[in-house]
């Protein structure tokens, strides 16, 4: 059984497997969880778990929040702003 087919059959991943799924180190994911910055997680007993659907949604949200991926956020696509006369 390939890893991709095994992941698709599993609804939840523990922290090391979620980090592998995202292509980051488990330590980075642990720090993000501690700072409440990363993808949503929950405890299942003593284990920290991540829903695969939540990981995918979080990645999509990160893509949309990045100006390089979302042209609407690109500052170069906006008209130039005039400086106010009071800000000197």
Image (spheres, rainbow, N blue to C red):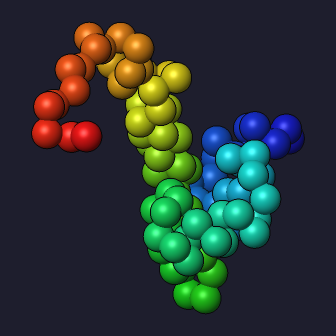
Looking at the image, is 58 positioned above or below residue 65? below
Q: Position of residue 29 (x, y in %)?
A: 66, 64
Q: Is residue 60 visible?
A: no
Q: Position of residue 59 (x, y in %)?
A: 52, 40
Q: Position of residue 50 (x, y in %)?
A: 55, 62
The quadrant of the picture occupied by the N terminus is top right
Residue found at the far front of this picture: 88
Which residue is depicted at the point 33% across and 18% down? 72
Which residue is depicted at the point 75% across and 52% down? 24
- Between 67 and 75, the residue placed more toward the observer is 75
Q: How many circles with numbers are drawn on the protein?
A: 0
Which residue is depicted at the point 66% across and 72% down? 30
- Between 28 and 59, the residue placed more toward the observer is 28
Looking at the image, is 39 positioned above or below residue 8? below
With 73 as the anchor, is 2 left or right in this view? right
With 59 as the anchor, is 64 left or right in this view? left
Residue found at the far right of this picture: 1
Q: Is residue 3 visible?
A: yes
- Between 85 and 54, the residue placed more toward the observer is 85
Which residue is depicted at the point 52% across and 80% down? 43
Q: Quadrant of the rendered structure where residue 5 is?
A: top right
The quadrant of the picture occupied by the C terminus is top left
Q: Position of residue 75 (x, y in %)?
A: 38, 21
- Between 77 and 81, the residue placed more toward the observer is 81
With 37 as the anchor, is 18 left or right in this view? right
């Amino acid at each position: 059984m390939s890893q991709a087919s095994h992941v698709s059959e599993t609804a939840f991943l523990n922290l090391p497997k979620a980090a592998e799924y995202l292509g980051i180190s488990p330590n980075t994911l642990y720090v993000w969880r501690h700072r409440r910055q990363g993808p949503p997680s929950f405890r299942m007993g003593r284990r920290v778990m991540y829903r695969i659907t939540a990981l995918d949604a979080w990645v999509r949200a990160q893509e949309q929040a990045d100006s390089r991926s979302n042209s609407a956020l690109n500052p170069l696509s906006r008209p130039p702003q005039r400086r106010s006369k009071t800000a000197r």
